[in-house]
Image: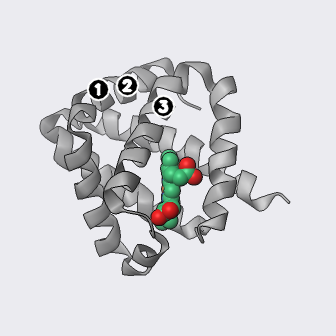
């Protein structure tokens, strides 16, 4: 469950890092590949283009938190496509760790414990929705 306060924390903190999307994406992928070098070969398209897509999807997700009914089917489709990219459930934990690390670097003192917990709650909704959609069929 995501509370209204958590939605506001995620949306407010995202607004602070979103203008530096390219730099944020670079930090994110560097951390991800450091944590698990085995995922690097799954990314076959240009990493800059990929970074832009990831940032766009996260923006969409963050902004879509107020309208979860509309967001869920989009995230389910995203989860099914990820299975096709060779992504397995344990990768979602590594991506979570890379994302939290990136937000901590990007937000500095603004990354409070409450903000971190709010991001974990939102990422958990996204990742469980993606993983469960990828596992049915
Ligand atoms: C909340 C979690 C995630 C979000 C929002 C997300 C978002 C995206 C988006 C928007 C794309 C572009 C292609 C498409 O729309 O199908 C993409 C591609 C991709 N993602 Fe994710 N992703 C997430 C989790 C992960 C995880 C856990 C991995 C595992 C390492 C991963 C690996 C990939 C790969 C390998 C591609 C294709 C890259 C390529 O074509 O080179 N993603 N992701």
Establish if 61 lies above or below 66: below
Residue matched to label 3 = 60
Name above or below for residue 67 compared with residue 44: above
Given residues 64 and 107, the one toward you in this image is 64
Give the distance between the C-alpha atoms of the residues marked 3 and 1, in whole angstroms: 12 Å
Give the structural element (helix, strand or loop) at label 3. Answer: helix
Which residue is drawn at the image coordinates 44% and 78% (left, top)? Answer: 41
Q: Earlier in the sequence, mark 3 or mark 2?
A: 2
Residue 85 pos. (x, y %): 59, 67
Answer with left or right where residue 11 lies relative to residue 121: left
Local crowd size for mark 2, using a 10 Å CA cut-off: few (<14), some (14–19), many (≥20) = many
Task: Indicate the quadrant containing the N terminus: top left, top right, bottom left or bottom right.
Answer: top right
User: Which label was assigned to residue 11?
Assistant: 2
Vertical placement of residue 111 versus 130, above or below: above
Instruction: For mark 2, give the secondary structure.
Output: helix
| Image quadrant in which the C terminus is located | bottom right
- Outermost residue, bottom side: 38
| Mark 1 lies on residue | 15
Tag 1: Cα neighbours inside 10 Å, few (<14), some, or many (≥20)? some
For marks 3 and 1, the one nearer the N-term is: 1
Q: Position of residue 130 (x, y in %)?
A: 64, 51
């Amino acid at each position: 469950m995501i509370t209204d306060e958590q939605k506001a924390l995620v949306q407010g903190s995202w607004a602070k890092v979103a203008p530096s999307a390219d730099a944020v994406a670079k930090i994110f992928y560097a951390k991800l590949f450091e944590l698990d070098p085995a995922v690097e070969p799954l990314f076959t398209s240009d990493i800059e283009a990929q970074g832009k897509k990831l940032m766009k999807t996260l923006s969409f997700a963050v902004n879509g938190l107020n309208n979860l009914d509309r967001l869920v089917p989009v995230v389910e489709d995203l989860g099914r496509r990820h299975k096709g990219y060779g992504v397995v459930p344990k990768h979602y934990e590594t991506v979570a760790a890379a994302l939290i690390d990136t937000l901590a670097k990007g937000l500095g003192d603004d990354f409070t414990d409450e903000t971190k917990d709010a991001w974990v709650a939102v990422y958990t909704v996204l990742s469980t929705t993606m993983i469960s959609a990828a596992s049915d069929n």
